Image (tube, rainbow, N blue to C red):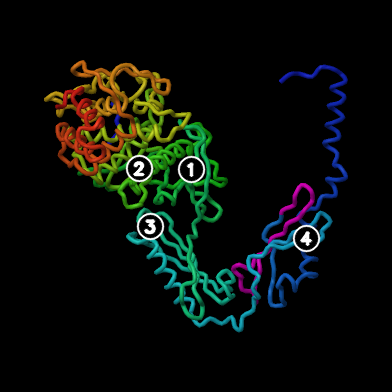
């Protein structure tokens, strides 16, 4: 497991009588229904008015004695205009595309109609040639095909005979809702429409719908989240980003040993909500930190895709998942390759708060990128480079987000630290030794340090390459980055830092790359991207020299 590891032991009053009297008069008027309000149509009167219209305009609406109608929704405007939405049946079979809306004036007079189809709905027979079991088999195979690579379990299929008026001439069809669980135990489902005469697939669509919601996070303010609507409940699961979701670990922990082999893994129950507005911005609501985690995951996904063209952490379009509320007063967050997931503790509340800040999320997911690319061994100098890679990309994710509530900086985990921690962040990239333990410069004993401390050299290199040496203020934070040899380094910007490090990681680094190897890998990457002898190439060399890697 790769961990972020913080290393902690242990209004104006109205006074005049005239105003008061006027206020009382207005209040009384507000509480007394006006004639206009009293005359406004109700839902019931709107339905009654629409029923009269159906009787009078049946032929023009395409209604016949074989068809039935039922009200799905009613909207009455402030001015009394009414809109009554109907579903339709044909010989008691649901008609897909049979829905229509009747628009009425305030007095109930017919205005117009919007119809999903204007085709005549009439079939020679409603007896299918294709059996229900066969339709179920066809739909089940369609679900498997849509989830290629997943082992599905608990498959269920429910065929229903319908009239399809959505796809050209109305015809008899089977609408089959098929559902299953994926390898994580999460629901997958699909609706498959099959011609009831020929057995050919007419259409298919996801039965679990996506939705755009918002959440009040602990650290990032109100943020957008992409969710999934399943029935009448929203899940904190994003199908637009590989099905990434956030679950509640219920303050439980794993029983793992022998190289991350788990006898039992802490549960991860997907967060759900009824109105798609998540969290309160306070830890008293368990979904608040889930918003942070999901937002962090979404932003990291977007960073890698939009900046580096990487489709998902593993590059395969599949999402990872988050577990929040792990353990009790747990001062940690970690990435685990075995579950391809991030896990976040709530912190002890004294030194650390919940470890779900944006840079921490970017850090953890970047461990997954490393594991699928260079797979830097998590020990010695390679381990330091592994940790630094996550710090570098976690920082770049934070800048990429451009969130006014959590502005980009070169401090790692600054949002999660509390006054009792003793400093303002878990790590500082401009001068890593500010924590009293991390290395600013390379030495022959660097590999003996804990990887969270030996990462300092690469973090320092990254800061120098992006921003340069000396004093600088960025987004309100002042930095003063020194160099090993007293040299002056001119930065080339964060975007170029990210591109160079990503190419080095994914093209040149291997599991055993040390600092000397990282220097060569980044110089090769800079040469590929900008040319040998370019400003960028020379800046990479200068930044490494400034941290004593030659």
Query: Are the residues flagged by discs 1 and 4 in contact, CB closer than 8 Å?
Result: no
Nearest the eye: 363 or 91: 363
- The residue stretch that appears in magenta: 75-100
Q: Nearer the viewer, mark 3 or mark 2?
A: 2
Disc 1 designates what residue? 225
SS at badge 1: strand
Q: Label 4 to label 2, Cα distance in Å? A: 52 Å
User: What quarter of the picture does the C terminus occupy?
Assistant: top left
Q: Which residue is mark 2?
A: 304
For mark 3, give the secondary structure. Answer: loop
Task: Judge whether residue 82 is colored magenta.
Answer: yes
Vertical relation: 463 (above or below) 124: above
Name the residue carrying label 4.
Answer: 111
Tag 2's secondary structure? helix
Q: Which residue sits at x=41%, y=67%? A: 142
Q: CA distance from mark 2 to mark 1?
A: 18 Å
Q: Quadrant of residue 529?
A: top left
The one of 109 and 133 positioned closer to us in this rendering? 109
| 17 or 401, nearer to the observer | 401
- From mark 3 to mark 2, how far is it between C-alphas? 25 Å
Label 3 Cα neighbours within 10 Å, binned few <14 / some 14-19 / many ≥20: some
Please tell me the numbered disc located at residue 182.
3
Q: Is residue 291 left or right of residue 105?
A: left
**Residue at figure coordinates x 77%, y 47% from the top left:** 78
Would you say 289 lies left or right of 314 here?
A: right
Residue ID at (66%, 75%): 120
Sequence-earlier tag: 4 or 2: 4
| Discs 3, 2 touching: Cβ within 8 Å | no
Is the residue 413 above or below the residue 212 in the image? above
């Amino acid at each position: 497991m790769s961990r972020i590891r913080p290393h902690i032991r242990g209004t104006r009053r109205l006074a005049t009588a005239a105003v008061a009297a006027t206020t009382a008069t207005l209040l009384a008027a507000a509480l007394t229904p006006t004639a206009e309000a009293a005359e406004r149509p109700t839902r019931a009167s709107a339905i009654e008015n629409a029923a009269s219209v159906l009787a009078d305009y049946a032929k023009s609406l395409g209604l016949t004695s074989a068809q039935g109608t039922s009200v799905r929704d009613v909207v009455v405007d402030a001015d009394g205009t009414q809109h009554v939405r109907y579903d339709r049946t044909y010989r008691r079979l649901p008609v897909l595309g049979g829905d229509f809306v009747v628009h009425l004036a305030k007095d109930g007079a017919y205005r117009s109609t919007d119809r999903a189809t204007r085709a005549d709905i009439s079939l020679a027979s409603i007896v299918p040639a294709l059996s229900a079991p066969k339709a179920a088999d066809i739909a089940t195979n369609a679900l498997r095909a849509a989830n290629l690579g997943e082992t599905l379990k608990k498959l269920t299929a429910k065929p229903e005979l319908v009239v399809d008026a959505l796809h050209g001439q109305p015809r008899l069809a089977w609408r089959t809702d098929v559902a299953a669980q994926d390898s994580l135990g999460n629901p997958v489902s699909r609706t498959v429409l099959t011609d009831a005469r020929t057995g050919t697939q007419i259409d298919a669509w996801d039965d679990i719908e996506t939705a755009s919601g918002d959440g009040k996070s602990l650290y990032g303010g109100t943020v957008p989240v992409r969710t999934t609507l399943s029935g009448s409940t929203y899940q904190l699961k994003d199908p637009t980003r590989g099905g990434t979701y956030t679950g509640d670990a219920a303050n439980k922990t794993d029983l793992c040993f022998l190289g991350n082999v788990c006898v039992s893994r802490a549960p991860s129950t997907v967060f759900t909500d009824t109105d798609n507005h998540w969290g309160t911005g306070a830890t008293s609501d368990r979904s608040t930190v889930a918003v942070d985690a999901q937002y962090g995951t979404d932003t990291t996904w977007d960073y890698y895709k939009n900046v580096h063209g990487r489709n998902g952490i593993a590059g395969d379009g599949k999402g990872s998942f988050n577990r929040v509320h792990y353990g009790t007063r747990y001062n940690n967050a970690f990435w685990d390759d075995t579950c391809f997931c991030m896990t976040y503790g709530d912190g002890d509340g004294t030194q650390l708060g919940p470890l779900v800040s944006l840079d921490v999320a970017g850090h953890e997911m970047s461990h997954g990128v490393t594991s699928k690319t260079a797979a830097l061994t998590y020990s010695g100098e390679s381990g330091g480079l592994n940790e630094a890679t996550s710090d570098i990309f976690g920082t770049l994710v934070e800048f990429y987000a451009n969130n006014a509530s959590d502005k980009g900086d070169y401090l790692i985990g600054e949002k999660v630290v509390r006054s009792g921690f003793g400093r303002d962040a878990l790590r500082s990239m401009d001068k890593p030794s500010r924590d009293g333990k991390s290395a600013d410069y390379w030495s022959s004993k660097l590999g003996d340090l804990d990887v969270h401390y030996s990462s300092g050299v690469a973090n320092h290199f990254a800061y120098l390459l992006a921003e340069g040496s000396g004093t600088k203020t960025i987004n309100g934070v002042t930095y003063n980055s020194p160099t090993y040899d007293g040299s002056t380094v001119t930065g080339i910007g964060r975007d170029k830092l990210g591109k160079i490090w990503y190419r080095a990681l994914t093209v040149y680094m291997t599991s055993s790359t040390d600092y000397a190897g990282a220097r060569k890998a980044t110089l090769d990457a800079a040469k590929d991207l900008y040319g040998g002898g370019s400003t960028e190439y020379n800046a990479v060399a200068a930044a490494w020299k400034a941290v004593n890697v030659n």
